[in-house]
């Protein structure tokens, strides 16, 4: 049996391919390829592209029509995500696919009226404020607190790994609102503006060449309207958002693209011992392994998307299983492809501030950079070790492991 997209879905794919080809000019593509356009702030390529997609109506491809979206199916959203990845176009997944839908489900009407149109237009961005020093793997132990202050709240604490803070207008912040309740029972979620007095951040460079941040909250006052959902009811918002984030980390498109480039390079490049690079048994075995597993990852994503389109709810065990396989396979895939390039795989064309270019970098250094970047996905959205615990408890009914 051959599983494939329908004719209508393939038409959408071609429409998107044509659109992204017009959207990404050579100049814009060069700026996006540096990987750190977010450092340029609201005038950088990252924000400009997202605003243009909002203006053209593509950001809300999966949002309900009542909120200004296209009400496309999950499978069609998968097509959109794949084509954006192949075109090198950034998508604000956390804002569009996690924060926005959570506000739709739990937000007040005023919150919906304020946030959703701006998100849909590509004018408003969120960072996620969950992990803390000492409370990353075990989110329920977080210590950032929000205390009542008249009709509002005052927030004190710090967060770690707060990504895309360079362009964020708000932080989707988890804080403890009841110190007497244990762990997840006393948590709430707030929308904290990044221009609020008492808020600050410091950059944290990573091995990927990108920059995340540590954020600080010192007597940050927010109004009552900043609370999303019920007081002390934030855990269900956090876990629901993370389920979507975990699956979103597992696109097969980027791996497919680098597999194609590596295979073509191996077919066209002479080997010192004679013949072509692709004639080497190790290269053929590695390419075959990556091809087989990336096809399986595509099927997993299609199955999840089809299920959601037919009324299935994405559960935490399924989200965790997908996240583990997808992210760990991505690390394996890029390692195997790096082996195909042999010693030349480690030559790179760095981004801004990373050092001098290597003129001999194979595939313009894209594979080397991708290998460094992909490592963070094994702990982004929750470490894979904790995901295995969740599968055991929530998927298999096993007892909670000792801490």
Image (cartoon, rainbow, N blue to C red):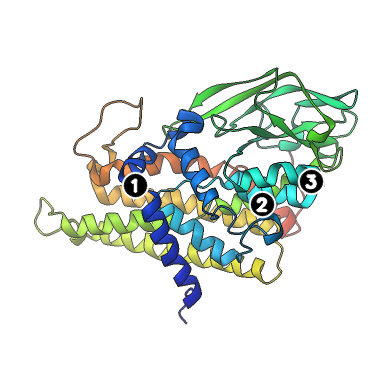
Q: Find the distance from the CA under tag 2 to the CA under tag 1.
A: 34 Å
Q: Is residue 101 left or right of residue 365?
A: right
Question: What residue is disc 2 on?
Answer: 243
Dot 3 surroundings within 10 Å: few (below 14), some, or many (20 or more)?
Answer: many
Q: Quadrant of the C terminus?
A: top right
Q: Residue 150 placed where, x, y %?
A: 91, 23
Q: Find the distance from the CA under tag 3 to the CA under tag 1.
A: 38 Å
Q: Secondary structure at mark 2?
A: helix
Q: Is residue 220 left or right of residue 216?
A: right
Query: Can residue 252 be seen by looking at this rendering?
Result: no
Q: Residue 83 placed where, x, y %?
A: 44, 58
Q: Residue at x 68, y 57 (%)?
A: 317
Label annotation for residue 93: none
Q: Secondary structure at mark 3?
A: loop
Q: Residue at x 71, y 37 (%)?
A: 139
Q: Nearer the viewer, residue 183 or 402?
A: 183
């Amino acid at each position: 049996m051959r599983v494939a997209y329908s004719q209508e879905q393939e038409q959408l794919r071609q429409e998107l391919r044509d659109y992204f080809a017009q959207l990404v000019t050579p100049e814009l593509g060069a700026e996006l390829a540096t990987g750190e356009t977010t450092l340029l702030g609201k005038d950088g390529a990252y924000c400009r592209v997202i605003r243009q997609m909002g203006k053209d109506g593509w950001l809300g491809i999966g949002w309900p029509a009542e909120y200004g979206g296209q009400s496309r199916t999950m499978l069609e959203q998968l097509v959109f995500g794949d084509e954006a990845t192949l075109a090198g176009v950034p998508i604000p997944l956390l804002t569009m696919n996690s924060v926005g839908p959570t506000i739709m489900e739990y937000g007040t009407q005023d919150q919906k009226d304020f946030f959703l149109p701006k998100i849909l237009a590509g004018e408003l961005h969120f960072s996620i404020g969950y992990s803390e020093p000492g409370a990353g793997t075990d989110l329920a132990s977080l210590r950032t607190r929000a205390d009542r202050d008249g009709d509002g709240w005052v927030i004190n604490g710090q967060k770690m790994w707060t990504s895309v803070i360079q362009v964020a207008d708000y932080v989707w912040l988890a804080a403890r609102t009841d110190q007497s309740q244990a762990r997840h029972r006393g948590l709430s979620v707030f929308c904290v503006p990044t221009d609020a007095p008492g808020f600050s951040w410091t950059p944290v460079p990573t091995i990927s060449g990108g920059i995340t941040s540590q954020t600080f909250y010192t007597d940050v006052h927010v109004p009552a309207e900043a609370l999303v959902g019920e007081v002390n009811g934030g855990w269900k918002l956090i876990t629901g958002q993370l389920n979507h984030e975990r699956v979103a980390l597992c696109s097969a498109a980027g791996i497919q693209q680098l597999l194609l480039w590596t295979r073509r390079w191996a077919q066209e490049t002479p080997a010192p011992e004679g013949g072509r690079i692709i004639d080497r048994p190790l290269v053929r075995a590695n390419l075959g392994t990556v091809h087989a597993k990336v096809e399986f990852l595509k099927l997993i994503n299609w199955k999840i998307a089809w299920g959601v389109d037919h009324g299935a709810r994405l559960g935490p065990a399924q989200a965790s299983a997908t996240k583990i396989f997808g992210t760990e396979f991505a690390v394996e895939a890029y390692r195997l492809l790096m082996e195909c390039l042999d010693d030349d795989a480690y030559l790179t064309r760095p981004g801004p501030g990373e050092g001098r270019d290597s003129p001999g970098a194979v595939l313009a250094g894209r594979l080397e950079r991708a290998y460094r970047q992909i490592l963070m996905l094994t702990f982004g959205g929750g470490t894979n070790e904790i995901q295995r615990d969740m599968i055991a408890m929530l998927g298999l009914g096993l007892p909670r492991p000792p801490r």
